[in-house]
Amino acid sequence: MNFAFAQFSLSGEIRPRAELRHGFKSPLSEGASPAFFIEQRSRINFSYKMEALTFHLSAQDVRIWGNTAQIYKTDPALTNLYEAWAAYQISSPLSIKIGRQALDYDNARFLGDLDWAQQGRSHDLVLLKFQDSLGTQVHLGAAFNQNVPFEPGKLTGTHYEGLDNYKAMQFLWFHKKMKSSKFSVLLLNDGRQKLNTNPEETTVYFRQTYGFIGSKKLLTRLDGEMEIYHQGGLDPVGKKVSAWLYSGSLTYNTGFIPLTFGYDYLSGTGPGTTQNNSFNPLYGTNHKFYGLMDYFYVGNNHGQGGRTTGLNDFFFKTNIPLNPKNKLLLHFHHFSSPELVYADAELTLSQSQHLGKEIDLVWNAQLSKEVAFTLGYSQMFATSSLSALKGGGQPAGLQYWAWAMIAVKPDFLGKK
């Protein structure tokens, strides 16, 4: 007689983070006061697995401390389902996953779950997955979005606007892992609704992204990684796109700490250019790559005249183990613009393309299996060119960002 046993998992997370922002995302101008606040993420995660079926729910609440009165009937905080999906194992190598889900591929350069942000990032889609025993994975995903408040009110049309999101998206991800190397290929097609007040508008502008990422052990202590992406098609306003991202790095493992030296290039658009040459990393975890102070590609602009000027980023990264439960992360970035930067709004007076240097320090302490404490400090040595790109005035002294975060993640059904 055969018995089938269901597997349950139930976990939680409480993650408050205090931040002091004195030049975070953009230089703080003279006369402006720095920001200080505490933001908290709370999650409850439930999973059920029985034979070929997996069911998963992740509910979250994201709020700023004090943003809601002590006695209230309305709440401005975000409370939603971060993930809600079901997966079915069709056969040994093939499965399907459908519902709201996070996408996190390779190093999260282009598709990432954005875990640093308290709300995270998730997509509504269907995902077909193939995985064999030889290190080959193939994922095929598709999504179609609508902003319909209630189904009974939607009787005609598929016009979609008012949200910074794709109307339709399809992607193919191929991954191959070998003995001393691995690589991935990504093909993604995302379509944005043409902005129009006509509810019967059907025009959608599609942009295509083609990506390759590979890593290989070059020597006993030397690892190499490279990435190349190209974007074509049409941007959200219907302008032709031709843009590139290149990245390469070498990591030397000393036996005590890893030393990583690398370079990121994201193309930009010059003045007077009729097409869009600015690469957009779209759905990646950009906080991870272009400096922790989020000056570039994280919900803000770094351009002039409606154009993004792109980025050159020479970086050094290391992670120093202080003891088995404490690590110190150190990053250094040297930023410049691949396109001209202008000192005035009329774009008549060009200036240096050097944007600044950033230093990031993060101390990670694992206090217990369920509790981790993180302390961070970053400083941007901004130039007048960076201030011009950001549209701000004269920066007010040092531009820095300090934060502290504690993450409590209990496994309610785990063994003691």
Image (cartoon, helix red, strand yellow):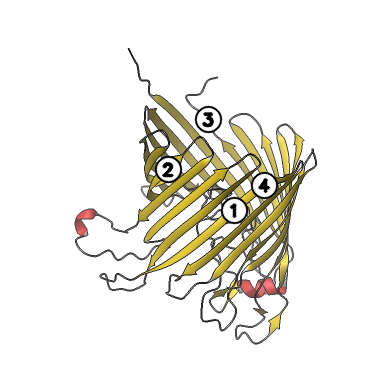
Q: Which residue is mark 3?
A: 410
Considering only order in the chain, which callout, 1 or 2, is on the residue closer to the N terminus?
Answer: 2
Considering only order in the chain, which callout, 4 or 2, is on the residue closer to the N terminus?
Answer: 2
Label 3, label 2: how far apart the Cα atoms are: 30 Å
Residue found farthest to the top:
1
Q: Residue at x 28, y 56 (%)?
A: 149
Crowding around mark 3 (Cα neighbors within 10 Å: few <14, some 14 to 19, many 20+) is some
Across and down, in percent, residue 245 comes to 60, 63
The amino acid type of the residue labelled 1 equals Ile
The amino acid type of the residue labelled 4 equals Lys
The amino acid type of the residue labelled 2 equals Lys
Q: Is residue 303 left or right of residue 102?
A: right
Per the rendering, the mark at residue 213 is: 1
Label 2, label 1: how far apart the Cα atoms are: 19 Å
Crowding around mark 1 (Cα neighbors within 10 Å: few <14, some 14 to 19, many 20+) is many
Q: Which residue is mark 2?
A: 129
Q: Is residue 322 left or right of residue 15?
A: right
Per the rendering, the mark at residue 216 is: 4
